[in-house]
Amino acid sequence: MRIGAVIVAGFAALAAAAATPQQIADGLASITQKFQTLQAPAQSITILNAPLIVIGQGPFPQIIAGFQDIVSTSTALAAQLGGTGARRRSVEPRDADADLVFTYRSLVRVAQATLNILIGKAGVVSKAPVVGGPVATALRGVEAIQDDIAIKLINMFSVRANDLTAEANSLDATMTLAIHSYESIMV
């Protein structure tokens, strides 16, 4: 009898973990907002406030904490995606799947805007090498979980795989450039 209860509990957990396209889109929108929030502190980076990272001041601790929050939120979303099977149906222009692709595209654009600000500021803070390591580490964490989400979305929404793959590749290229920009200024 206990085996039956375990099986029922297992199926219940899978059903609870499965996310609808709208829930996935909401999760992506939340991550998008978190990237957007990091743009102001990223734009405030100067050669004068960059070294303040050593004492937990300036914009970098806020940026690093923001990236950690993105990783946490993204990890929760990825867990929901893990329980969702492939969707194999046609997609109409106003379908929930199309809206999900649009939401992912928005995430990519906002994330790239945030990363491009950081890439531009890497040159400004090149004289403060204490910044490079912590920022590169935070970015690698974001990259890993965003890659995981992209792969799961591509597998789930195979009808939209080309669109999702193009967006994921675009984000990955910008993420790689941002990581290299900060790795190059490490002590």
Image (cartoon, rainbow, N blue to C red):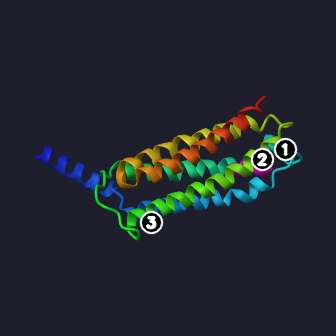
Q: What are the residue bounds of the magenta stretch?
A: 56-63
**Helix, strand or loop status at disc 2:** helix
Question: Which disc number belongs to residue 99?
Answer: 3
Location of the C terminus (image quadrant): top right
* Amino acid at the residue labelled 3: Asp
In-front residue for pair 138/94 = 94
Indicate the amino acid at tag 2. Gly
Residues at discs 1 and 2 in contact (Cβ within 8 Å): yes
- Residue at x-position 64% and y-position 52%: 112
Secondary structure beneath dot 3 equals: helix
Residue 131 x, y percent position in the rendering: 77, 39
The local secondary structure at tag 1 comes to helix
Q: Which mark is residue 120?
A: 2
* Left or right relative to 12: residue 96: right
Residue annotated with mark 1: 124
Circle 3 residues within 10 Å: few <14, some 14–19, many ≥20: some
* Residue at image point 62% right, 58% down: 110
Q: Residue at x 71, y 57 (%)?
A: 39
Whether label 3 touches label 2, CB < 8 Å: no
Q: CA distance from mark 3 to mark 2?
A: 32 Å
